[in-house]
Amino acid sequence: MIRRRFVPANFTARNAKSVANLFKQLERRKIANAWALQKWILDWSELSSILAENSARRYVAMTCNTKNKIAAEEYKFFVSCIDPVISEETEKLQKKLLAHENLCDLESEYGNWFKAVRTNLELFREKNIPLETQINLEIQKYQKITGAMSVKYKGKIRTMQQMNPYLQSPNRKEREEAWRLLTERRLQDSDALDTAFDKLFALRIQAAKNTGYKNYLNYIFKAKHRFDYTPQDCKNFHESVEKIILPLQKEILRQRAKKMNLTKLRPWDLGCDPLGRPALKPFKTGAELISKCENLFSRLNPQWHNWYKILQDKNLIDADSRLGKAPGGYQITFDEARVPFIFMNAANTNQDVYTLLHECGHAFHQFAMAEQKLFAYREIPSEFAEVASMSLELLGAEDLSDFYGKEDFRRSRIEALQDIISLFPWVAIIDAFQHELYTRPNHTAKDRKEIWLSLQERFDAGVDWSDLKKARSYLWQKQLHLFEVPFYYIEYGIAQLGALQVYANTKKSKDLAVFKLIKAERLGSSKPLPELFNAAGIKFDFSPKTIEPLALMIWDEIESLA
């Protein structure tokens, strides 16, 4: 825990007035020179860190148990009463900052942040504050819908995540039964999720209009500080994936169908072993998963192992899936303490191992930049944050001896590398879907289905969806990013290319590649994206000249293992 220098030791953000008072103190403070300005900035940063941690802990409590009414109310209070104060008062401090005569004296140290602040001020509208509150509350309602989803299977109530092993069963009838049961359960809430999306969509469109933008697409690119690429770059990425990656995905599925003696693959034929072997079961409990990963990191890298031990010792990983727990996985940071927290829904599948590796990548990134004094520099652009997580998936998965013997390791490795190929088309679909939706602000739920189905056809890899049109038309509802963090998905594609470059660099020198990666992570967001990538020894580029050789590298590795 970093010792507080400005915020009182007993401050806990229990009411809006106490939060506003601290902001007012900063607003009223006289700043005589550059030294005083820097101290003022760091005091503001301290307050931001404390408030961020307060919000994060409430979010963790709510998502770990969506049935906990007290936790839900605590989070709702912060979103409804504290966040609006933060938004309003932050705007005042940003104006005070940019108006200061000594700003140029700190440009070399804080220039990247100043650029972001100027953008934030340009987009700030007071009437958007209640809209942001409403958006957060609507997201909470969405999470309650998805967190309540469960099915009764083989005499037991199971979460959606706990059904994953049945989707990997060698018994095709069992897989189909499980798939249909899950799909029917999701479709029960399809109208509710459509309504939830419509509400969120309308609020976001209004926020963009309030700032003078004709469409949300251009607004969100600016709001996300996407200074280094454009919507057209994203469309070019979609086309490159269609041309370069999709044929590889089609070949993977063609080979799968051949091994399974099927003329056509159905949706329930994609998660099982194509040779009919039982699903990989790398662990029995979340505690065992956590323990085995500790052994993995002890061999992989001493710095990563030290950071992982902190996660273990401080109980900062919630791994098991259970009823009432929100779906998905995330890493969030307790910013004042400078420690990360990992949330996931393990159900004894191969993918769970990769999920923990992925979230550990984010957690290690947080540890790496913990010494960044400026709160804003500990908020990393997603395009680089995901490089950290995806790199760790690739590097950690080279040694799964605690989980598997030689043959099962080969299976796991092939599956993971094939998943990388499959990721790119899915990223392109999700991103293209959002580009279409948010440039058609008056679209209906019916239009949404048609847009989605057209993209499914464009990136179709050969799966037979006949008689399953309704299920296919609602597949997008499984992607929580569309509800919670719109336009957060292209980052996975950009970052995967970065991670593959890190992986390629390890073929020359693993120690040097990891050293450069951690060195870049320590920079936080103090540098623009191209400079962060360069510090890691990789290029910020997602054009065909980068995509093609990396895709072929993965393809060659798959072929060598097959």
Image (tube, helix red, strand yellow):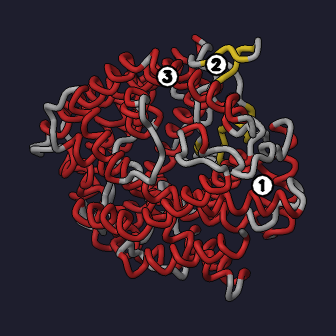
Tell me where residue 265 appears, x and y as whole percent.
55, 45
Which one is earlier in the sequence, the residue at label 2 or at label 3? 3
Q: Is residue 297 above or below residue 44?
A: below
C-alpha separation, residue under disc 2 versus residue under disc 3:
16 Å
Tell me the tag on residue 186: 3
Q: Nearer the viewer, mark 2 or mark 3?
A: 3
Q: Is residue 62 above or below residue 115?
A: above
C-alpha separation, residue under disc 3 versus residue under disc 1:
36 Å
Tell me where residue 560 appears, x and y as whole percent.
70, 76
Which residue is found at the position 60% from the left and 47% from the top? 262
- Image quarter of residue 440: top left
Judge by depth and name the residue closer to the eye, 424 or 532.
424
- Image quarter of residue 468: top left
Disc 1 crowd, CA 10 A, few/some/many (<14, 14-19, 20+):
many
Tell me where residue 493 appears, x and y as whole percent.
44, 61
Disc 3 crowd, CA 10 A, few/some/many (<14, 14-19, 20+):
many
Q: Is residue 244 above or below residue 504?
A: above
Disc 2 crowd, CA 10 A, few/some/many (<14, 14-19, 20+):
many
For the residue labelled by badge 3, is the local secondary structure a helix, a strand or a loop? helix
Tell me the amino acid under the disc marked 1.
Tyr
Cβ atoms at labels 2 and 1 below 8 Å apart:
no
Q: Left or right of 421: which side holds 288?
A: right
Q: Dot 2 corresponds to which residue?
A: 324
Q: Is residue 516 above or below residue 468?
A: below
Q: Dot 1 corresponds to which residue?
A: 308
Which residue is found at the position 41% from the left and 66% from the top? 35
Q: Nearer the viewer, mark 2 or mark 1?
A: 2
Tell me the amino acid under the disc marked 3.
Arg
C-alpha separation, residue under disc 2 versus residue under disc 1:
27 Å
The C terminus - image quarter: bottom right
